[in-house]
Image: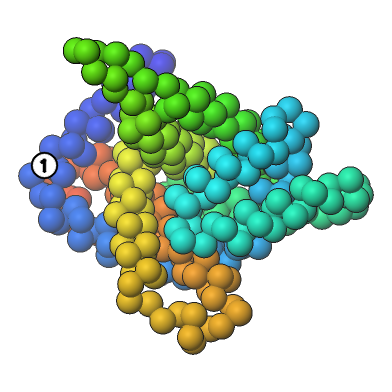
Amino acid sequence: MSRRRDWTARLKDQRANVYILNHPLKFTLQVLKGFRANQGLLLAGAVAYYALLSIVPFLMLVMVVLSHFINPTELLETLSRYLQLLVPGQSAPIVAEVAHFLDDRQLITWVLAVTMLFFSSLAFTVLENAMSVIFVHRVAIRRRHYLVSAVLPYCYILALGVGIMVVTLVAGALQVMGRESVWLFNYEWSLNGVSGALLYLLGLIGEILVLTSIYLVMPVGRLSIWHAAIGGVTAALLWEAARHILVWYFSTLSQVNLVYGSMTTAIVVMFSLEIAATLLLLGAQVIAEYERVGLVPDDAAQDPMTTAPDAAR
C-alpha cells in the first residue's frame, strides 16, 4: 500500500513539475489569484496581530527556562542577533524587555507563567486556522481532532525552545572559532569573517527549517517533506529579500518616528510581522497550488484552489 502511495505521489509531483516548467507565468498568476481569493492579506493581518501578542511572552518564557542551563548573557546575545531576522531594526527594545524580565524572574508565579504560556500559543492557533483556509481541499477531506489542535501550539512552543537552545550553543561555538586564526602560506588568516558567514548561514538554515516545519505540521493531513521544503525555501528567500529592503527603508527613507512617536516600535514590528505573515501564507499557497496542479491533467489546471463561493460550486 505504501509503495502504491509513493508511486502515486511521484506521479503527481512529476505532473506538477512539468506543468510549472511549461507554464511558469500561469502558475505564478494562479498562486496570486488563489491567495487573493482566499483573503490572504486579511489572514496575514490576523496572524501578525496575534504574533505581536505572542512574541514577547514566548521569548520571556523560553529565556527564563533556558537560563537554568545556559548563561543568560549568551542567550540574550543570540536572541539579539537572530531576532533581527524577524523584526529588522527593532530587536533592541524587545531584547531589553526580555532582559529586564530575566532580572526579575524570581517574581514569576504559576498564574503568570500559565497566562504567558496561553498568550504565547495564540499565534500558532491563528496560524493553524489560516492554514486550514489555504489548504481547504485537505480540510474538506479530513478534519483535525480538536484535542490535537489544542495541544499542537504548545508542542510547537516546546520545539522552538529546544531549537533556540541548539542555535545558542552552535552560535557560541562559532563565535569562539571566530577569535581563532590559522597559518596558511606563511600568512595568518583570521577566522572572524568565516565565523560571521557561518552565523548568518545558521540563521538562514534555521529560518528555512522553521518555515518547513510549519508547512509540514500546521496543515491538516500528511504533507510530504518535499512539498514543505518548497514552501519553506520560497518563503525564506522572499523574506530575506523583504528584510533587507525593510532595513534599508527604515534606515534611510522612513519618517515613522515623526509620525508615530512612542508607538514607533510597535508599529514597525507589526508592519514587519505583517509582511512576514504574508510571505508565510504565500508559501502555503504555493504548496496548495503545487498539489492541485499535480492532481489534474495539464489542460485542466486552470483555476486556483480557493474558498471563494463560486469555486465551491
Quarter of the image with the C terminus is: bottom left
Q: Quadrant of residue 282?
A: bottom left
Q: Is residue 110 visible?
A: yes
Identity of the residue furthest to the front in this view? 186
Q: Is residue 258 left or right of residue 241?
A: right
Q: Amino acid at mark 1?
A: Leu
Left or right, 93 with respect to 68, comes to left
Quarter of the figure that contains the N terminus:
top left
- Pinpoint residue 83: horizontal percent, then vertical percent: 52, 50
Where residue 32 appears, as percent x and y from the top left, is: 27, 62
How crowded pointer 1 is (Cα within 10 Å; few <14, some 14-19, many 20+) is rated as few
Indicate the colouring scheme: rainbow
Please give the name of the residue rendered at 49% of the width and 87% of the height, measured from the top-left corner: 259
Where 35 falls versus 101 (above or below)? below
- Is 249 or 191 nearer to us in this picture? 191
Pick the residue in front: 10 or 82: 82
Residue shown at 61% from the left, 62% from the top: 93
Residue placed at 77% from the left, 53% from the top? Answer: 101
Residue with the mark numbered 1: 21
Q: Residue furthest left?
A: 22
For the question of whether residue 143 can be seen, the reply is: no
The number of callouts visible is 1
Instruction: Decide which of 107, 9 is in the foreground and name it.
Output: 107
- Classify mark 1: helix, strand or loop: helix
User: How far across and down, in percent of the image, does residue 293 sit?
Assistant: 24, 45
Q: Which residue occupies 60% across, 50% down? A: 124
Q: Is residue 165 left or right of residue 282?
A: right
Q: Position of residue 166 (x, y in %)?
A: 57, 28
Q: Which quadrant holds residue 276?
A: bottom left
Asked if residue 81 lies left or right of residue 183, the reply is: right
